[in-house]
Image (cartoon, rainbow, N blue to C red):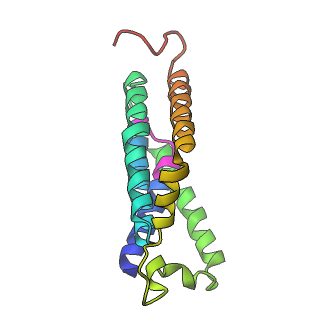
Amino acid sequence: MSYVMCIFMVGLVLGLIVVASNPSPYFGALGLVVVSGMGCGLLMSHGAPFLSLVLFLIYLGGMLVVFAYSAALAAEPYPETLGSRSVLVTAIGYLGVVLGGVGYLSSGWSKGLWFTLDEGGEFCFVRGDMGGVALLYSFGGGLLVLSGGVLLLTLFVVLEVCRGLSRGTLRAV
């Protein structure tokens, strides 16, 4: 299980480096999908499969559709790839910062973080995320309305950012 956790953590960090190194929107979307998948895999490994599934479906169902639409409107004729010089230099710089932080902080304080939530007790009959499911169904209506409003606001912000200098986002494609 610890090998799977290592793969999820390395994939999460590499996906974050791809997103932060600022390639074209197409490769940024690929990095965001990798980060989303690896983060949900980490949540699932720590004993929260329902939360992991909900976050993954909400992310891929809502935000990635908006991102794909705005990337299609802001199409570049010559996009920056992951192997281009400026993106590669920034990615190597971010990887150096991450490795330096790991070297500085690896003094043994994180030994207990490798255990999942259900490995703590032998007679655990209730999964770790069942309390969250109960709260979602009892007090989740307001949070659902709030998250829908936030997604709508994000749609307007992304479309305004990708608008361009002279043309609006609602043009004939």
Identify whether 105 is placed above or below 34: below
Task: Please say if 62 is above or below 13.
Answer: above
State the residue in front, 118 or 109: 118
Q: Quadrant of residue 99?
A: bottom right
Quarter of the image containing the N terminus?
A: bottom left
Image point (46%, 45%), residue name: 85
Is residue 105 among the parts visible in the rendering?
yes
139 over 45 or under it: above or below:
above
Query: In the image, is residue 22 part of the stretch drawn in magenta?
Result: yes
The quarter of the picture where residue 126 lies is bottom left
> How far across and how far down the image is residue 97, in percent?
60, 63
Comparing 88 with 31, the one in front is 31
Residue in the picture at 63% in, 83% down = 109
Locate the C terminus and report the quarter of the image it occupies.
top left
Residue extending furthest toward the bottom: 122
> In which quadrant of the rendered view does residue 98 lie?
bottom right
Identify the residue shown where x is 43% and y is 71%: 47
The residue positioned 36% from the left and 9% from the top of the image is 172
Q: Which residues are magenta?
A: 18-25
As drawn, the residue found furthest toward the front would be 138
Give the percent coordinates (x, y) of residue 42: 44, 66
From the viewer's perspective, is 134 left or right of 4? right
Q: Position of residue 83 (x, y in %)?
A: 39, 48
- Residue 21 lies in the magenta stretch: yes
